[in-house]
């Protein structure tokens, strides 16, 4: 069961049935912010980019 929680002013998804779910592990890797400023938004964006690279990592396939 998924639940939307408000943590430090940020909505996060929580899987209440499985404490080791992908959603819970992602939430643990993302830093919470007490306030949203231009700098914190930029930092959050960089964190999400790195998370996306990790989640969607692929290998180069040779065309030859």
Image: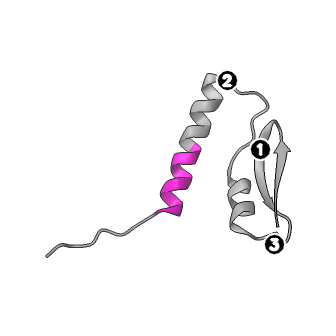
Q: Earlier in the sequence, mark 3 or mark 2?
A: 3
Residue span colored magenta: 47-56
Q: CA distance from mark 3 to mark 1?
A: 19 Å
- Quick one: label 1, few (<14), some, or many (20+) residues within 10 Å? few
| Circle nearer the viewer, 3 or 2 | 3
Looking at the picture, how far across and down is residue 36, in whole percent?
71, 27
Classified by dominant secondary structure, the portion drawn in magenta counts as helix
Residue highlighted by disc 2: 37
Residue 44: which quarter of the image?
top right
Left or right: residue 4 compared with residue 48: right
- Number of residue marks: 3
Residue highlighted by disc 3: 18
Relative to 53, residue 20 above or below: below
- Quick one: label 2, few (<14), some, or many (20+) residues within 10 Å? few
Left or right: residue 55 compared with residue 6: left
Circles 2 and 1 in contact, beta carbons < 8 Å: no
Q: CA distance from mark 3 to mark 2?
A: 33 Å
Q: Quadrant of the N terminus?
A: bottom right
Question: Is disc 1 placed on a helix, strand or loop?
Answer: strand
From the viewer's side, name the closer residue of 15 and 48: 15
Q: Which mark is residue 11?
A: 1
Question: Is disc 3 placed on a helix, strand or loop?
Answer: loop
Looking at the picture, how far across and down is residue 57, in whole percent?
45, 64
Left or right: residue 2 compared with residue 63: right
Q: Which residue occupies 52% across, 60% down? A: 54
């Amino acid at each position: 069961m998924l639940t939307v929680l408000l943590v430090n002013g940020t909505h996060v998804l929580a899987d209440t049935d499985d404490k080791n779910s992908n959603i819970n592990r992602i939430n643990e890797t993302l830093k919470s912010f007490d306030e949203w400023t231009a700098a914190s938004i930029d930092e959050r964006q960089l964190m999400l980019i790195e998370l996306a690279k990790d989640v969607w990592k692929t290998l180069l396939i040779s065309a030859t």
